[in-house]
Image (spheres, rainbow, N blue to C red):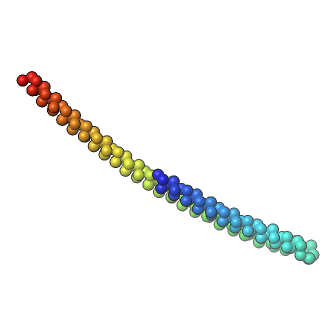
């Protein structure tokens, strides 16, 4: 059981790290967009050129964000499938472990019952012998 708990904790830590990485990537894209807009707005240029540059940058950022969203969606889908597979494996491992434990406990109980039955038979024989001796 401790093995499964430790394995789960490792998976959580791995997902946390991946989440931070994705957040940093998205933050970088958004930061790049904001920085480029700020650069365009502070550069000396005509309003028409500035608007054109902002449109081009916005289009580029939109494409980048769209690509990032598709990548993140694919990664989440892949992670979900992997998590489901791992969960199924862990459930099967737990089932096997519990089955082995159950079988071992059953074997131990059967041994105890057999030992008890043997002792009862021995005690019954002693009692029969004593009864026979007293009846003679």
Residue 132 located left or right of residue 59: left
Q: What x and y, as percent, mark residue 84?
A: 53, 56
| Residue under the image location 37 percent in, 46 percent down | 102
Whether residue 93 is visible, yes or no, is yes
Residue 31 located left or right of residue 122: right
Q: What x and y, as percent, mark residue 90?
A: 47, 55
**Of residues 58 and 3, which is closer to you in this image?**
3
Residue 63 located left or right of residue 132: right
**Figure quadrant of residue 15:** bottom right
Check the image and report above or below for 105 versus 81.
above
Residue 100 located left or right of residue 64: left
**Of residues 53 and 113, which is closer to you in this image?**
113
| Residue under the image location 76 percent in, 66 percent down | 30
Check the image and report above or below for 17 versus 41.
above
Check the image and report above or below for 49 versus 104.
below
| Residue under the image location 13 percent in, 28 percent down | 130
């Amino acid at each position: 059981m401790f093995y499964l708990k430790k394995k789960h904790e490792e998976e959580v830590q791995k997902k946390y790290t991946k989440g931070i990485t994705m957040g940093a990537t998205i933050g970088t894209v958004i930061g790049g967009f904001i920085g480029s807009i700020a650069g365009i707005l502070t550069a000396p240029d005509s309003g028409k050129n500035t608007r054109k540059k902002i449109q081009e940058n916005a289009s580029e950022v939109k494409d980048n964000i769209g690509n990032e969203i598709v990548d993140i969606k694919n990664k989440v889908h892949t992670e979900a499938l992997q998590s489901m597979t791992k969960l199924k494996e862990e459930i099967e491992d737990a089932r096997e472990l519990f089955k082995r434990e159950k079988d071992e406990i059953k074997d131990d109980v059967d041994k105890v019952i057999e030992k008890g039955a043997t002792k009862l038979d021995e005690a019954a024989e002693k009692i029969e012998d004593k009864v026979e001796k007293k009846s003679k």
